[in-house]
Image (spheres, rainbow, N blue to C red):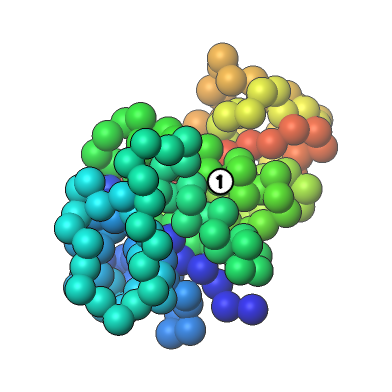
């Protein structure tokens, strides 16, 4: 099954960085003003969704789903739900962080939503890649100079971090004490993170 790439309207400053993550057969969903990134990403939409309050409705041969402005779902949440309905299990989210802080937090919650439904999802911006660690361990190759673990869904227990400058074993990380920020893989090693109970947001940072 192809991967679904959801493109939001938040700023993208380094298109080459995002392009390095794309595959030729990705299915692209552009959400409203995410269409501003079509030229920079050099990928035609397979689907366009939005209420078109921040971008005019395009003249396009792509499929378009026009949404009402008064609705419960944001355009990006609707796009994810529609992609799940179409059978996608693997997601890349770009153009969804930066700009309005409330929209950024809402899009971070989209990672939790997709994880709750057993989907694999990666959120990427100019500097980092983010995913939820829950049922399966995650790895951080030494190509990433830093990584952080944040409790964004309540307390995470039995947290294990191996081959990192700050290792952990059987630890708990809570939302009110962010001591999992700015860890580092050991030189030449691939750090590994697992969670026994709960979920963590893993942020792999490519630049300091």
Whole-percent x and y of residue 61? 30, 81
The residue at 47%/41% (across/down) is 73
Instruction: Tell me the crowding category of disc 1: few under 14, some 14 to 19, or many 20 or more residues within 10 angstroms, Cα based.
Output: many
> As drawn, is 119 to the left or to the right of 53?
right
Residue situated in front as seen by the camera: 26 or 62: 62
Question: Does residue 177 appear in this view?
Answer: yes
Residue situated in front as seen by the camera: 71 or 84: 71
The residue at 64%/37% (across/down) is 200
From this view, report whether residue 19 is shown above or below residue 36.
below
Residue situated in front as seen by the camera: 181 or 121: 121
Q: Secondary structure at mark 1?
A: helix
The residue at 54%/23% (across/down) is 178
Quadrant occupied by the N terminus: bottom right
From this view, report whether residue 41 is shown above or below residue 158.
below
The residue at 25%/52% (across/down) is 52
Quarter of the figure with residue 161: top right
> As drawn, is 58 to the left or to the right of 117?
left
Question: Does residue 186 appear in this view?
Answer: no
Whole-percent x and y of residue 40? 21, 70
From this view, report whether residue 142 is shown above or below residue 152.
below
Whole-percent x and y of residue 46? 41, 76
> As drawn, is 129 to the left or to the right of 172?
left
The residue carrying mark 1 is: 111
Quarter of the figure with residue 7: bottom left
């Amino acid at each position: 099954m192809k991967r679904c790439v959801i493109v939001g309207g938040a700023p993208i400053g380094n298109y080459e960085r995002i392009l390095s993550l794309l595959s030729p057969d990705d299915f692209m969903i552009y959400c409203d003003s995410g269409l501003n990134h079509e030229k920079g990403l050099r990928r035609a939409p397979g689907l366009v969704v939005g209420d078109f309050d921040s971008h005019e409705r395009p003249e396009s041969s792509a499929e378009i789903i026009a949404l009402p402005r008064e609705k419960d779902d944001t355009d990006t949440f609707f796009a994810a739900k529609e992609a799940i309905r179409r059978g996608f299990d693997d997601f890349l989210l770009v153009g969804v962080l930066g700009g309005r802080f409330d929209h950024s937090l809402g899009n971070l919650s989209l990672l939790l939503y997709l994880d709750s439904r057993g989907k694999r999802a990666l959120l990427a911006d100019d500097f980092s890649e983010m995913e939820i660690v829950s049922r399966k361990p995650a790895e951080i190759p030494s190509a990433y100079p830093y990584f952080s673990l944040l409790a964004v869904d309540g307390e995470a227990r039995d947290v294990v971090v191996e081959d990192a400058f700050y290792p952990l074993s059987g630890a708990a990380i809570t939302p009110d004490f962010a001591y999992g920020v700015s860890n580092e893989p050991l030189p030449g090693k691939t750090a590994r993170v697992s969670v026994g109970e709960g979920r963590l947001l893993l942020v792999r940072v490519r630049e300091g």
